[in-house]
Image (cartoon, coloured by chain):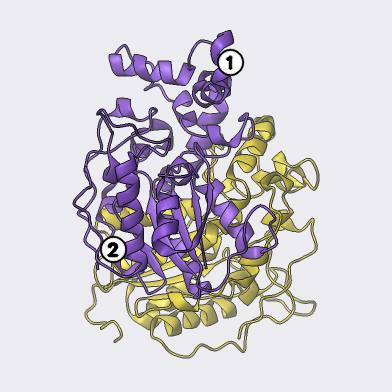
């Protein structure tokens, strides 16, 4: 039995990072298709903990009500709300500072942040290392756990429709970070999530970054990208995709990129991870 | 078939009289304990994953079809700080960065005594090295700023860490359909975490409203009443083992596990409903009781 959608008071609530911002992008398209109001609570540069903290608060305060839809774009689990950051949207790449090798943090943030703030952050490098070592190998599964947690939430709020994406792969280079001391990704690679799909919960297994591809358009193409790393056309198609998932329609995969994923610029010091093949 | 236990002290191997040995007899299966006192959920889950990934661990029998996996999730605050002298010292560390452990109260003094440990004398160094290491936490006070940063950074979502661990284990049970999973928590899901100012937890409403019943499937069972609420804080003439249970409670707990594994309604009449708490949490007062346990 599918959720019955009726009335004009229902709302779509979006949680996540930059992929979920910009109300003139796919959220706007989704709002038009679904004929419902959209509330974007996503914030660029933030991680899953930030998104889930907001979601929990919204549920506790009953700001999300029966027959609403919740779309969660789970970002890179390494984006924690580090207490020493002045801006929580600057969580990207912080764990690189704790690494002895492959630390390209400074190359990427010099243009975006003030020298004084960078100096402050760099001073925390030893603490960043401790945080990574303390989280340890189980942190590889943090977004898996976030997905299963959202599944539990969906089972507790049966009248709310939940759509969950990850922005990047579930590993997203975490296993390359020596401080987490991850010996194997075998189990992570083997995991399947089909058992989670129920009437009011869908987890879309292909990461958004792997759907939309690199931000730089291929040579000869002049698509302008919005703040959410998608072209205008991709925003329209992604809005349709989210709508189709909500409505239990078959999704159009023909426009998914077939070359390489969009990737976090702070991770491009490594060989790019393989494109997720959607079956 | 084998029963594999992953746990803190509640599931450590204390030999004859302890519940794993009793369960071994009841189920007529070999029981293998991967428990260690003072460790946390990450320690247990890491070990479980290693065994699921690689059956050639020479310290543990391989997990085979129809085997049972019993996980006793300890306090989520028992994290594996890299400067701990050994992995059984994880409890109480977050308190070192809180202001709550040094008030001028009897409970505060008691806690401080626990954190500082006994005086190091020649006698207890020879006879009680483990005890010294276990309770001498004040040596880590110098790391308080780091501990505070870790807690601040983990933030309010850390309240749900064991909820996530339970749902993660549920996913594993869907992946490994030929293994039976029986999951407990040793303490409540909050276990005073919300009182720690450094985690900045504003509300526990959602946590207390959560219903886990849908998780229970033919090869997965989560027992919603923590073990500490079953066995309580024992004050009496009878001795209890290092797994915090009397010999009788060990027998009853083994029977409880046996009944669930056999799909029988377990006996809960022996539950004390007044929790045993670890020495680092007692000063915070007794937690409210968890929801009534109903076997379905």
Determine which residue is flagged by label 1: B125
- Cβ–Cβ below 8 Å for labels 1 and 2? no
Count residues near mark 2 (Cα–Cα under 10 Å), then give few for <14, some for 14-19, many for 20+.
Answer: many
Q: Report if residue A15 is visible in the image.
A: no
Give B86 or B31, whichever is nearer the viewer: B31
Chain identifier, colour yellow: A
Residue B258 visible in the shown view: yes
Which chain identifier belongs to the purple chain? Answer: B
Residue A103 sits above or below residue A258 on the image: above
Q: Which mark is residue B48?
A: none
- Which chain hosts label 2? A
- Residue located 23% across and 47% down the image: B271
Q: Mark 1: give few (<14), some (14-19) or many (20+) Cα within 10 Å.
A: some
Location of residue A68 by image quarter = bottom left
Q: Quadrant of residue A64?
A: bottom left
**Dot 2 corresponds to which residue?**
A64
Quadrant (top left, top right, bottom left, bottom right) of the C terminus of chain B: bottom left
Give the residue drawn at x 40%, y 49%. B19
x, y (%) of residue A140?
Answer: 61, 56
Numbered disc 2: secondary structure: loop
Q: Is residue B84 left or right of residue A244?
A: right
- Element under label 1? helix
Q: Nearer the viewer, mark 1 or mark 2?
A: 1
Nearest to the observer: residue A126 or residue A116: A126
């Amino acid at each position: 039995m599918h959720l019955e959608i009726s009335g004009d008071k229902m709302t779509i609530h979006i949680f996540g990072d930059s992929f979920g911002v910009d109300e003139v992008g796919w959220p706007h398209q989704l709002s038009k298709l679904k004929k419902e109001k959209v509330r974007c609570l996503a914030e660029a540069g933030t991680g899953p903990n930030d998104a889930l903290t907001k979601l929990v608060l919204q549920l506790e305060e009953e700001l999300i009500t029966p027959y609403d839809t919740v779309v969660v774009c789970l970002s890179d689990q390494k984006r924690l709300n580090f207490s020493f950051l002045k801006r929580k949207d600057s969580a990207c790449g912080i764990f690189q500072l704790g690494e002895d090798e492959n630390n390209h943090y400074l190359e990427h943030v010099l243009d975006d942040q003030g020298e004084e703030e960078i100096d402050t952050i760099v001073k925390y490098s030893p603490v960043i290392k401790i945080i990574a070592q303390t989280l340890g190998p189980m942190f590889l599964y943090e977004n898996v756990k976030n997905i299963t947690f959202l599944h539990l939430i969906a089972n507790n709020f049966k009248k709310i429709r939940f759509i969950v994406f990850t922005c990047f792969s579930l590993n997203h280079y975490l296993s390359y970070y020596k401080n987490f001391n991850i010996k194997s990704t075998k189990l992570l690679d083997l995991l399947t999530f089909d058992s989670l799909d129920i009437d009011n919960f869908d987890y879309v297994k292909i990461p958004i970054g792997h759907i939309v591809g690199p931000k730089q358009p291929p040579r000869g193409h002049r698509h302008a990208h919005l703040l959410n790393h998608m072209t205008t056309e991709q925003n329209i198609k992604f809005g349709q995709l989210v709508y189709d998932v909500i409505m239990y329609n078959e999704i159009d995969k023909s426009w998914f990129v077939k070359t390489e994923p969009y990737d976090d610029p702070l991770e491009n010091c490594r060989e790019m991870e393989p494109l997720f093949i959607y079956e | 078939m084998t029963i594999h236990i992953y746990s803190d002290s509640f599931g450590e191997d204390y030999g004859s009289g302890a519940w794993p040995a009793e369960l071994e007899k009841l189920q007529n299966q070999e029981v293998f304990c991967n428990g260690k006192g003072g460790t946390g959920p990450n320690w247990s889950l890491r070990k479980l994953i290693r065994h699921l990934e690689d059956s050639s661990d020479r310290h543990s029998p391989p997990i085979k079809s129809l085997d049972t996996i019993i996980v006793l999730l300890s306090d989520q605050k028992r994290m594996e700080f890299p400067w701990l002298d050994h992995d059984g010292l994880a409890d109480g560390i977050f308190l070192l960065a809180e202001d709550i452990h040094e008030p001028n109260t009897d409970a505060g003094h008691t806690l401080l005594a626990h954190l500082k440990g006994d005086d190091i004398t020649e006698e207890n160094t020879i006879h009680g090295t483990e005890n010294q290491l276990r309770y001498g936490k004040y040596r880590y006070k110098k790391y308080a700023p780091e501990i505070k940063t870790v807690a601040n950074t983990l933030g309010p979502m850390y309240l749900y860490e064991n909820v996530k661990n339970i749902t993660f284990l549920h996913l594993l049970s869907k992946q490994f359909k030929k293994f039976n999973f029986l999951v407990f928590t040793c303490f409540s899901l909050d276990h005073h975490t919300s009182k720690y100012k450094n985690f900045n937890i504003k509300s526990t409403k959602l946590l207390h409203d959560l219903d886990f019943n849908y998780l229970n499937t033919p090869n997965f069972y989560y027992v919603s009443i923590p073990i500490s609420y079953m066995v309580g804080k024992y004050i009496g003439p009878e001795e209890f083992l290092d797994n915090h249970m009397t010999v009788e409670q060990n027998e009853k707990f083994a029977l409880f596990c046996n009944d669930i594994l056999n799909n029988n309604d377990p006996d809960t009449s022996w539950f004390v409903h007044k929790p045993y708490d670890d020495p680092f949490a007692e000063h915070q007062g007794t937690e409210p009781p968890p929801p009534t346990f109903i076997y379905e």
